[in-house]
Amino acid sequence: MRNRFQRLALKLLPEGADVLDFGAGTGIDAKAFAAKGHRTFVYEPSAAMREYLVQHCSDEIALEKIIQIPSPLACKVQGVTANFAVLNHFEDHTLLFEELSRVVHPGGFVLASMLNPYYLGDARYAWWRKNLVNLLRRGHYAIASESRIHRFAPRIVARAATPHFRLERLAPRGLRLATDLYMFLLLRRL
């Protein structure tokens, strides 16, 4: 899944374009983008993850191929990537997309991998079955846990991104939405 995400992001980025890795974690994606010639800004709110990122990407940070920033608003980029369910930690994406619209150049993009609310592999859990009605009615549900994970129908994310971004692509589509744990959303800056 990580390789698919990285390939898609790199395909979307023009040669030498800057990118923001939002919720960069340990910097695995950032390192891949920097290796392909993209100056990569990284925003990671977790202090523990930032420590790993600094260790994993020390050479790229020293060469300023990877640049740590204290806020996603501290850069202007062609694209924003948010891999491995970073956006599932937000209850409402409206303000986030408004802020990202100030970061992403017109015509640029936000590429996110999100936990798929329709994934049937989760049907074995009572929380999934309990929230199926919420998903169908409201397009959103939260899982009561320490991590505060939210699951969204793609239309809810697309609505939150409006009027700054439009949903350009969703993968997978059709019946594969029932079999893939993650879905990729590509939102284009208007």
Image (tube, rainbow, N blue to C red):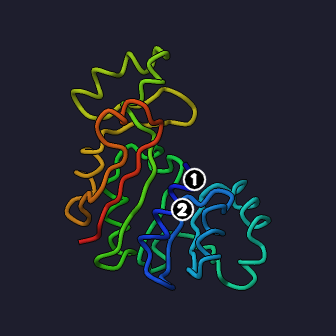
Of 116 and 43, which appears nearest the observer?
Answer: 116
Res. 177 mark: none
Mark pair 2, 1: CA separation: 6 Å
- The three-letter code of the residue at mark 2 reads Gln
The amino acid at mark 1 is Arg
Read off the residue under disc 2.
6
* Residue lying at 34% horizontally and 39% vertically, measured from the top left: 152
Residue 160 vs 38, above or below: the answer is: above
Measured as percent of width and height from the top left, residue 19 is found at: 50, 74
Residue 21 left/right relative to 132: right
Q: Tell me the element at label 1.
A: helix
Residue 117: percent from the left, percent from the top?
A: 38, 33
Q: Nearer the viewer, residue 100 or 35?
A: 35
- List the residue tagged with mark 1: 2
Q: Residue at x 43, y 46 (%)?
A: 90
> Which picture quadrant has residue 23?
bottom right
x 30%, y 49%: residue: 157
